[in-house]
Image (cartoon, coloured by chain):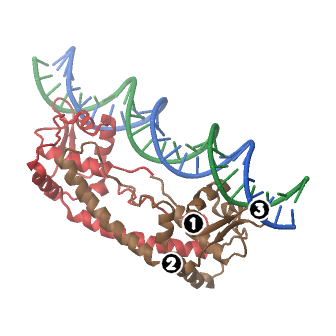
Chain colours: A red, B brown, C blue, D green
Amino acid sequence: MRHDTRLSRMLHVLVHMDRHEGAATSETIAAMLGTNAVVVRRTMAGLRDQGYVRSEKGHGGGWILARPLRDITLLDIHNALGAPQLFSIGLAGDNPNCVIEQAVNASLAGAMHEAEAILLAKFGKVTLAGLAEESSKRWAKPAHCSLEMEHS
Amino acid sequence: MRHDTRLSRMLHVLVHMDRHEGAATSETIAAMLGTNAVVVRRTMAGLRDQGYVRSEKGHGGGWILARPLRDITLLDIHNALGAPQLFSIGLAGDNPNCVIEQAVNASLAGAMHEAEAILLAKFGKVTLAGLAEESSKRWAKPAHCSLEMEHS
DNA sequence: TAATCATGCAACTAATATTGTTGCATGATT
DNA sequence: AATCATGCAACAATATTAGTTGCATGATTA
């Protein structure tokens, strides 16, 4: 089953944007992520609608952080991306009247809800400022990337 | 993102098999699950290889439980299915040298590992016998399904 | 005002993973 | 010998996501 890496990638982008002077274009971000500008716009649109970034057209335009990193948590971004399913396993629904299916699904759902609550609680406690700080600590060894195209 | 319902469905099947006299054919199981006998064989093959079920050919053949339900946990079946990814979100790996990506991924991975450990621990504590017992409690209201084709 | 740059959006194509299908071989029962 | 059932491999269908293209709109700059 394929992974949804949008959360990881968007967090990466947002922290970079904070270090970046001026707006970052979709094209630049796409180059960093090894993807396409339209895909970037599609994904960033969700963050814009929730007020985490702004987009500006024209010369010098692009994407700009609309809030300080310390006011954004991993949970915020997860939700802004549409709060996609966290789990790749799901419940069968072929026989909703079957008491066995009900018992199986109730047990699985209970465990999954508990794990999900813990995961989201953790996400809610980590700010992007915290991530930026943590990455600064890793800065000692100089290998890194940036929005200035050191990627490719 | 599409869900992998094999765990849920196989648990359902295994509990039914315990109530079932004799072997259950792939065809019968497939009818119950609204799928195909070959798909059932593919999935059950993993459980057979781990010793949870046996398969027998010929007249009266099919699938038989190889252990009592109380000796099988949800975790056992999850593992027998290949321990597929539990989470549908994943980590970006485009810029492994980037300290920001590293910090982002370390944070996400930490939260996910914690949640995963909790989920698997829960799975390890639930036996199929427990599920069978729980479904018996639901038996008061008679709607149910069985391997005798009440499904379709 | 004209040229350029950048997003917004919709429609289309491509790539990928899973599921479903078919055909044939093998083994067991009757 | 006939029937039933799994085993396996190759192929087709399906669904989802990612990527692409084309055009419109708005902002900046000269």
Counting from the top left corner in percent of width and height, residue C8 is at 31, 38
Name the residue type under label 3: Gly
Counting from the top left corner in percent of width and height, residue B45 is at 59, 60
Marks 1,2: beta carbons within 8 A: no
Name the residue type under label 2: Thr
Q: Quadrant of residue B67?
A: bottom right
Q: What residue is shown with label 1?
A: B10
| Residue drawn at x 57%, y 78% as measured from the top left | B69
Please rate how many residues cluster around mark 2, counting C-alpha atoms within 10 Å: few if below 14, some from 14 to 19, many from 20.
Answer: some
Q: Indicate the quadrant containing the C terminus of chain B: top left, top right, bottom left or bottom right.
A: bottom right
Q: Chain of mark 2?
A: B
| Residue drawn at x 25%, y 66% as measured from the top left | A122
Name the residue type under label 1: Met
Q: Quadrant of residue A45?
A: top left
Q: Nearer the viewer, residue A8 or C5?
A: A8
Q: What residue is shown with label 2?
A: B127
Q: Nearer the viewer, residue B40 or D29?
A: B40
Please rate how many residues cluster around mark 1, counting C-alpha atoms within 10 Å: few if below 14, some from 14 to 19, many from 20.
Answer: many
**SS type, badge 3:** loop
Residues beneath discs 3 and 2 located on the same chain:
yes
| Residue drawn at x 64%, y 57% as measured from the top left | B35
Q: What residue is shown with label 3?
A: B58
Is residue B143 placed above or below D29 in the rendered structure? Answer: below
